[in-house]
Image (spheres, rainbow, N blue to C red):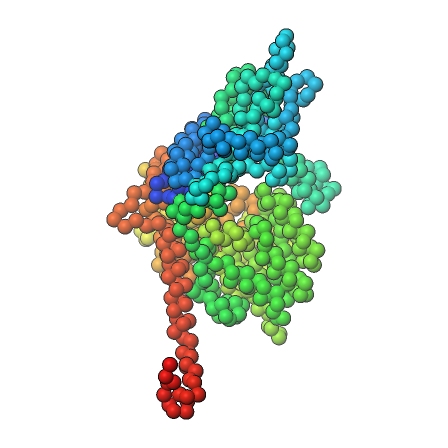
Amino acid sequence: MSNSVYDNRELSWLKFNKRVLEEADDISVPLMERLSFISIFQSNLDEFYMVRVGSLHDKLLSNDNDRDGKTHLKPSEQLDKIFSRTKNLTAAKDASYSALKSELSRQGVKQLSYKELNSKEQEYVDAFYKYEIKPFISPQVVDKRHPFPFLKNKEIYLIAKISSKKQGEGVVKLGIVSTQTGGAGAISRVIYLPTEDKSEVRFILSEDVISHFCNKIFDGFKVQEKALMRVTRNADLDLENSPMAEEMDFRAIMSEMVKKRKRLCPVRLQLSKQLSDLTSGELSNRLELTKKQVFVEKSPLDMSYTFGLNDKVKNTLLFNKMVTPQPSPDIDENVSIISQIEKKDILLHYPYESIKPFIKLLNEAAEDPEVVSIKITLYRVAKDSKVIDALVKASENGKEVLTLVELRARFDEENNIGWSQRLEDSGCHVIYGPRNMKVHSKLLLITKKCGKTVKYITQVGTGNYNEKTSAIYTDLSLLTANPEIAEDAFNVFHALSMGTLVENPKHLLVAPNSLQNKVAEMMDEEIALAKAGKEAYIGLKLNSLTDKVLIDKMIECSKAGVKIDCVIRGISCLVAGIPGETENIHIRSIVGRFLEHARIYIFGVSERQKVFISSADFMTRNTLRRIEVAAPILDQKIKERIIDIFNTQMSDNVKSRIMQPDGSYKRTTPTDTAIVAQDLFYSQAYAAAQSKDNKASEAKPKKKKKRGLFARIFGRKKNR
């Protein structure tokens, strides 16, 4: 099979992040939102280097012949291509930022350098530096008596090449000062400047102020050159398989991992300007980086400050129109949510519909005397989690509460360690899942004892139990009282408690033993129908596609004549549209206001159509190395709704990019009718909520006006 049908996972991800950056150049997007996309692009790239580049770096050191299974690239070859494409992306980011900075300045949002400040502002910044910055900075000089300091991950430093002012002492040294020292919040990153025009926001970044005062910071030296710098460190660490794993509690192991991660080796160095070969080479040697890993960037090295600007900027035209998740039209807020689910299956579509019914379900279960147990898998939860509050309340009310807390959820380890402790302290039974296998499923099982009858409520979702992300990630949540679905869910939780794996569930697809193989079997069914001359179809909505077994099966489908439509937000290691290979496969990516996160699998057409929602992407890590769950949609109305959601996204002609046969992506061009799927879903949610309100209003009996004593006696209204 030709390698042209495959794309490298890491390079495909960089294409995705390029699509994110393209939103910063989209003139239909409000200016402040465009600035946010640059910040998202950079945050994505940070994590990519910490995780994926870090992993490749480790492979390079251990075995550079460990080739990628699809494109057969060695770790060193992948890294070279990543570094080259990163330089191109960095240049594009800088251009986008420069253009946006100018446009925002014309709208009264002005980020300034010290030289651009007026005299009053310079006086203000001078005083700010003297009283708010200088007391907290600790400059260091690197020489034989002063070792090179440890540079914290993603922290911005000022680096200077300095020499002594004293005659005869021309030894060149390095001067380093952190721009973020003094503890959390000691130095404000954004320094807002006083202005009489309340419509204006004028500001300067603290690192630019510190850089301006470099000569005063190193006042005993001559500053020959200077730049801001930022190091990204490897975050790919596995303590679970270390010798200490046999001796330590798993929560203690993960706490140790979080500490160790902070000191792993650098994989990238960002500089605010080009330094001389001598200085740059010295830095590279100290950090054990190659020249390819050094990137010079003209825009701020950390763009996360942009989100803090949102509260300061008052011009609403610079932002998206505000929208809020709406009440589900299928739920009556005045009636028990459990009783409603027992009557019919309910689907919630985030962020267009609110997560509140799910929170209400948990709170209701915590109080319901018939509820005896609640079992749930937790991967990422909100900072002030109402989900955790409800589980704690349930435990305190005497319910049996089993919580699978995934301590290995990357970059949420510390949060989850804390949550697991709180849950345990409240009396919940906390487990962590099998060794070497993350529990990524989104599964809830509520058990009721009604007299001699046992009833269940099961929830299966595509996204986390997180109130914050439910307002910005697109996800689906199925609520059902189906006893057979509940039986499968019960078996999943039983296996998790026993440290075993589910083998052959009746309805749910459960990785690692019965998801990849079941999906492949359903693909085989479509292949057989296509070969028999019948209509065959597969529809997939995923975040990523990397599983080679399923990719090869999709290629087989295409060759047999099965039509495959895919909405894949991020990575796709399959290249669509190649004649004779993948010509029947269509792949599009949607990048818009909300993060596309739901997973939908559709097999077949008409009456035989099977529809699933899932927490699992078609990635080997999901299908074979995680506990994942996909739920069949058995309610016909909900099935039709999910198919409509999928078809609407396939019709998006504004925020879609279509994969080309060379693996590149081309933005769609709107026809007579522009369709933005995310906007359409919100419009539908608002319309459904309004219709619901109108019906409720019409159903209420009209109140009779209270008549005064005069009118009651004489049968007519009192004169006024």
Name which residue lies at 48% across and 53% down.
Answer: 471
Regarding residue 232, the answer to whether it shows in the image is no
Q: Quadrant of the C terminus?
A: bottom left
In the picture provided, is 180 more to the left or to the right than 329?
Answer: right
Q: Position of residue 676 (x, y in %)?
A: 35, 49
Q: Quadrant of residue 61?
A: top right
Q: Position of residue 420 (x, y in %)?
A: 66, 51
Regarding residue 653, the answer to whether it shows in the image is yes
The one of 149 and 268 positioned closer to us in this rendering: 149
Q: Residue furthest top?
A: 168
Name which residue lies at 67% across and 65% down.
Answer: 397
In the picture provided, is 289 more to the left or to the right than 610?
Answer: right
Q: Quadrant of residue 103?
A: top left
In the picture provided, is 31 more to the left or to the right than 452?
Answer: left
- Is 78 placed above or below 19 here? above
Q: Quadrant of the N terminus?
A: top left
